[in-house]
Amino acid sequence: MNNVATGKSFITMSKLINPPAKPRTLLNLKEAIWHNYKLL
């Protein structure tokens, strides 16, 4: 948010719009077995 000399505040439209999230495949970096549970 920016203040101008008139004392008013404004925010740019690009700060209000979020780009859509891109779907992606997550990789398992580590996994372990603990009390018959598989932890990923």
Image (spheres, rainbow, N blue to C red):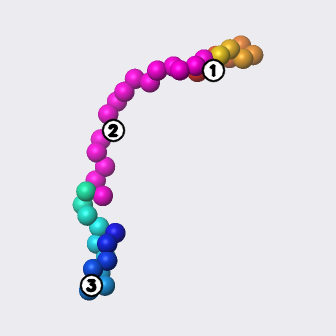
Q: Quadrant of residue 1?
A: bottom left
Does residue 19 appear to the left or right of 26 in the view shown? left
Give residue 7's position: percent from left, percent from top: 31, 85
Q: Which residue is mark 2?
A: 21
Q: Secondary structure at mark 2?
A: loop
Marks 3 and 1 close (CB-CB < 8 Å): no
What is the three-letter code of the residue carrying label 2? Ala
Give residue 36's position: percent from left, percent from top: 71, 13
What is the three-letter code of the residue carrying label 1? Leu
Q: Quadrant of residue 32?
A: top right
- Magenta: main secondary structure equals loop
Mark sitting earlier along the chain (3/1): 3
Q: Secondary structure at mark 3?
A: loop
Residue at mark 2 to residue at mark 1: CA–CA distance: 26 Å
Q: How would you rate the neighbour count of disc 3 (Cα within 10 Å): few for under 14, some for 14-19, many for 20 or more?
A: few
Q: Nearer the viewer, mark 3 or mark 1?
A: 3
Does residue 17 appear to the left or right of 36 in the view shown? left
Give residue 31's position: percent from left, percent from top: 60, 17
Quadrant where the C terminus is found in the figure:
top right
Q: Which residue is mark 1?
A: 39
Q: How would you rate the neighbour count of disc 2 (Cα within 10 Å): few for under 14, some for 14-19, many for 20 or more?
A: few
Range shown magenta: 15-31
Residue at point 24% right, 60% down? 13
Residue at mark 3 to residue at mark 2: CA–CA distance: 37 Å
Mark sitting earlier along the chain (2/1): 2
Does residue 1 appear to the left or right of 37 in the view shown? left
Q: Which residue is mark 3?
A: 5
